[in-house]
Amino acid sequence: MARVIVDVMLKPEILDPQGQAIARALPRLGFAGVSAVRQGKRFEVDLEGPADDAALAEVRKMAETLLANPVIEDFTLRVAE
Amino acid sequence: MSGARVGVVTFPGTLDDQDAARAVRLAGAEAVPLWHADHDLKGVDAVFLPGGFSYGDYLRCGAISRFAPLMEELIPAARAGLPVLGTCNGFQILCEAHLLPGALTRNAGLHYVCRDQKLRFENVDTPWTSDYAPGQEVVIPVKHGEGRFVANETTITGLEANGQVVLRYVGNPNGSLNDIAGIRNEAGNVIGLMPHPEHAVEELTGAPGTDGLGFFTSIMKALVNA
């Protein structure tokens, strides 16, 4: 059994007002030196079998179809240690 | 009396289906309830995708609804020319289903916006908007937290060049690119808009008037004359 992690982020050119709100809140909480924050989503996909090439291709398809909206989001896959 | 039948889709979490059905009836057409879990469009002549929070807006607004059994029938039918109007969550579903370009994202100001919104018609060459005139200004309610229309530059340029922008905000409530409030597909049979014409069809409750009724009288005429 393996776990594949899919990280989904808004494309860099898409405004992320939630990230901006977080960035604005940080100095008020005493955290200095942050120039920007972008907020994304992380999916942990547990596979019944090993994370081989075929399984990873299938997760990639899942990400393109459902987990991310390719119109506004990019995603990356990695196998969890 | 007319024979024009407009389907109104209900997903789990849809809110505005009853108002939409009422608006369809006010315009003189028959409102046919369509259920998300059915593989059945019941032979309707047009489909209204109402607003709400289908599937709780889980993942992204419209992302789950887009794979509902009913959508498996609706998507090919829309591609084949069936008139489809999506408002608010319906617009989000149409974008997620790639029947319309672009996407609806979190409002720029992060606030949920609920107000009577001034709008201007741009291109009215669709079966849902023939009773309006280009340049006409109307007031129709908006109520959404994720209505900021975005698309890449090529798409926006294409929408503008092809006359696919149907409605623009006069006073942008959510940061939508080019003040876009509603668009249509290239063929013109599928439109999506964030405002709610179904909430502006009666003097008594249609705050502040009946500016939304034209969408329903337009489709009625389009179907009767078809």
Image (cartoon, coloured by chain):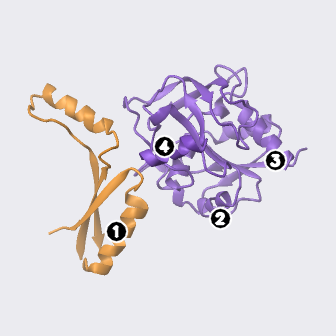
Which secondary structure, mark 3? helix
Say which label, 3 or 4, has the lower sequence index.
Answer: 4
Q: Residues within 10 Å of mark 3 (few under 14, many from 20)?
A: some
Say which label, 2 or 4, has the lower sequence index.
Answer: 2
Q: Nearer the viewer, residue B54 or B161?
A: B161
Task: Using the numbered discs, state the Cα–Cα distance from disc 3 to disc 1 in whole angstroms.
Answer: 43 Å
Check contact, mark 4 vs mark 1: CB within 8 A. no
Of all chains, the one bearing label 4 is B
Of all chains, the one bearing label 3 is B
The disc labelled 4 sits on which kind of residue?
Answer: Ile
Farthest front residue in view: B161
Q: Is residue B120 above or below residue B188?
A: above
Chain ID for orange: A
Task: Using the numbered discs, state the Cα–Cα distance from disc 4 to disc 1 in whole angstroms.
Answer: 28 Å
Q: In this view, does B6 lie to the left or right of B51?
A: right
Task: Using the numbered discs, state the Cα–Cα distance from disc 1 to disc 2 in whole angstroms.
Answer: 28 Å
Q: Where is residue B166 in the image (x, y as percent from the top left)?
A: 61, 37
The disc labelled 2 sits on which kind of residue?
Answer: His
Quadrant in which residue A77 is drawn: bottom left
Question: Which residue is denoted by mark 4 in the rendering?
Answer: B156
Question: Which residue is denoted by mark 1 in the rendering?
Answer: A60
Query: Chain B in the picture: what colour?
Result: purple
Task: Using the numbered discs, state the Cα–Cα distance from disc 3 to disc 2 in whole angstroms.
Answer: 23 Å
The disc labelled 3 sits on which kind of residue?
Answer: Leu
Question: Which residue is denoted by mark 3 in the rendering?
Answer: B223
Mark closer to the observer (2, 4): 4
Q: How crowded is mark 4: few (under 14 residues within 10 Å), some or many (20 or more)?
A: some
Residues behind callouts 3 and 1 on a single chain: no
Question: Which residue is denoted by mark 2 in the rendering?
Answer: B39
Q: Which quarter of the figure is the N terminus of chain B placed in?
A: top right
Q: Which residue is at 73% across, 50% downward?
A: B46
Residues behind callouts 3 and 2 on a single chain: yes
